[in-house]
Image (tube, rainbow, N blue to C red):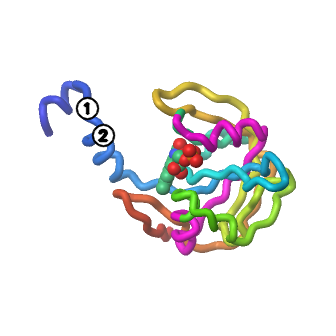
Amino acid sequence: MSDSTLSGARVCADRFRSVLSHYPTGVVLVTAPPPAPAQPPPAMIVGTFTSVSLDPRLVGFLPAKSSTSWPRIRAAGRFCVNVLAADQQQVCRGFAARDPARWEVPYRLTPAGCPALVDALAWLDCEPAGEVEAGDHWFVTATVRDLAVQRTGPPLVFLRGDYGRCVA
Ligand SMILES: Cc1cc2nc3c(=O)[nH]c(=O)nc-3n(C[C@H](O)[C@H](O)[C@H](O)COP(=O)(O)O)c2cc1C
């Protein structure tokens, strides 16, 4: 371990990314209702989703301040968290790359009117509850209004810059 690590001196960005990449995250697709009938629903792939509080029922995630999707999702006043399965890696890549065909994947609308992918493991209808500045990200908390499991199976995980699966 280097002295700079022990002393807490400013850590370089590459090292920060590299070390943190050893921590696995789940992968979700956050969606909102389309702003107008002819427009695609706003959607973004998120690895920072987490359960926050049981009472009240809060979840959270961290959209980057540079995200163009988050302001559109925020404006909708509600969003759906789709928990992606290990076999949805291509779906994930399509949304992350904003593939024009990304919305050809089957989905239905949740009670709040947000797209829930038919093959996602689970979905949660959420309403933004708070937003706190966190460096170059926002830390968004949201109240869970409804939720369901659609199927069981290994979730998609992101680790060391690549996708994998997690089995309990
Ligand atoms: C596995 C994975 C996890 C990601 N996690 C986040 C995240 O937690 N927060 C975030 O703002 N962007 C995250 N991104 C990047 C976004 O999906 C997206 O590329 C970014 O928001 C820019 O697109 P936008 O301008 O449409 O929002 C992640 C991407 C991948 C592939």
- Residue 50 is situated, as x and y percent measured from the top left of the image, at 58, 46
Tell whether position 72 is magenta. yes
Q: Which residues are magenta?
A: 66-93
Would you name the residue on which mark 1 appears? 11
Contact between labelled residues 1 and 2, with CB atoms less than 8 Å apart? yes
In the image, taking residue 45 as reference, residue 33 lies left or right, namely right
- Residue 28 is situated, as x and y percent measured from the top left of the image, at 59, 56
Label 1 residue SS:
loop
Classify 76 as above or below 85. Answer: above
Label 2 residue SS:
helix
Distance between mark 2 and mark 1 Cα atoms:
7 Å
Q: Can the viewer see residue 155?
A: yes
Q: Quadrant of residue 100?
A: bottom right
- Residue 77 is situated, as x and y percent measured from the top left of the image, at 78, 38
**Residue at (16% x, 29% y) in the render:** 4
Q: Which mark is residue 16?
A: 2
**Residue at (65% x, 52% y) in the render:** 43
Classify 91 as above or below 20. Answer: below
Q: How many marks?
A: 2
Q: Quadrant of residue 119?
A: bottom right
